[in-house]
Image (spheres, rainbow, N blue to C red):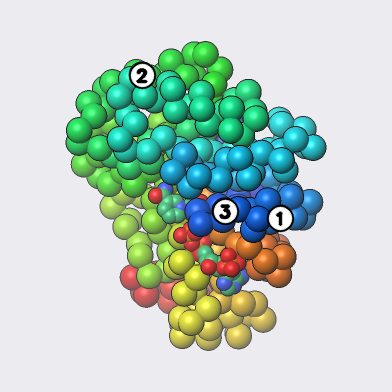
Amino acid sequence: MDIPRVTLNTGAQMPQFGLGTWKLTGEDCVRAVPVALEMGYDHIDTADVYGNHREIAPALRDVDRDSIWITSKVNRGSLRYDDVLATCEKNLGELEVDYLDLYLIHWPDPEAPMEETFRALARLVDEGMTRNIGVSNFMVEHLTEALAVAEAPIVNNQIKFNPAHQPWDVVELCREHDIAVTAYSPLMHGDAPENATLQAIAEEMGRTPAQVALRWLLQQDMIVIPKATSEEHLRENMDIFDWELTPQLDQRIRALA
Ligand SMILES: NC(=O)c1ccc[n+]([C@@H]2O[C@H](COP(=O)([O-])OP(=O)(O)OC[C@H]3O[C@@H](n4cnc5c(N)ncnc54)[C@H](OP(=O)(O)O)[C@@H]3O)[C@@H](O)[C@H]2O)c1
């Protein structure tokens, strides 16, 4: 199965679909990540604060590092210059890899000067510790400030976006600046299957509500990172590339906001 790529403003090709790993910890994580990679997942989304880098690492030992996209994030509270460098170095050690594909500021932090954080991120790029940098949970005011101070290109903004939560103003600003959008919590934290509209569309399409939510986000040109633990969910979430929602169905989901 070919997972589509999004071309970032650095020229990097980011898989448009990946495995979210928030709350995927311990044995569940050790078991699920290799199952996902075996299935064809080639993009893992993690973060310093998820505390699961060491559980992801074993799955990465047996694969060609260059064939997997790894995103991690530095948390607020660690956004001063030296803290960013030290956290990234720690994260690389935990994951047992030499570089990240993408390192994000997890949340904006008014306590840390943004210019200082971006100076540290640019250094990580210069030193080859990450190939791209970006942000997460940056709303319009945060992104506007970031664009004014960032030394290296901001390639990605990872925000909560799903049928029930549609902050289009941030998406529009990202598009103006050629910043790719990753939709987190794409399954509404697991509530997508209970949504009546998604259920009705799923029935019409012969799909599941989770697949309808993910497919809809792909059609908005967003990157999706559903979290799943069971083999059944992992497989179901991947089956979204060879069918389409009509413009009418797209509008019905937009109207859920
Ligand atoms: N940047 C940020 O601040 C931020 C914040 C939140 C999330 N994220 C990222 O985004 C990822 C996804 O978001 P999320 O974890 O909040 O929630 P989500 O992906 O919207 O939903 C995950 C939940 O949906 C269930 N699920 C998965 N596939 C399913 C299916 N096909 N049918 C029914 N239920 C299904 C999972 O259950 P099982 O696990 O039991 O399969 C889990 O309970 C995170 O893991 C993380 O990587 C980033």
For label 2, the SS is helix
Residue 224 in view: no
Residue 97 in view: yes
The amino acid type found where label 2 is placed reads Asp
Q: Residue at x 71, y 55 (%)?
A: 31
Q: Residue at x 64, y 58 (%)?
A: 28
Kindly identify which numbered label has been placed on residue 112.
none
For label 1, the SS is helix
**Looking at the image, is 192 positioned above or below residue 77?**
below
Residue 244 is left or right of residue 183, and the answer is: right
Residue 156 is situated, as x and y percent measured from the top left of the image, at 44, 38
**Which image quadrant is residue 174 in?**
top left
Mark 1–mark 3 Cα distance, whole angstroms, equals 10 Å
Identify the residue position indicated by label 3 in the image.
Answer: 25
Residue 222 is situated, as x and y percent measured from the top left of the image, at 49, 52
Identify the residue position indicated by label 1 in the image.
Answer: 31
216 vs 36, nearest the viewer? 36
The amino acid type found where label 1 is placed reads Arg
Residue 114 is situated, as x and y percent measured from the top left of the image, at 26, 27
Q: Answer with mark 2 or mark 3, whichever residue precedes in sequence.
A: 3
Q: Residues within 10 Å of mark 1 (few under 14, many from 20)?
A: some
**Looking at the image, is 246 positioned above or below residue 218?**
below
Q: Residues within 10 Å of mark 3 (few under 14, many from 20)?
A: some
Labels 1 and 3 touching (C-beta < 8 A) = no
Identify the residue position indicated by label 2 in the image.
Answer: 82
The amino acid type found where label 3 is placed reads Thr
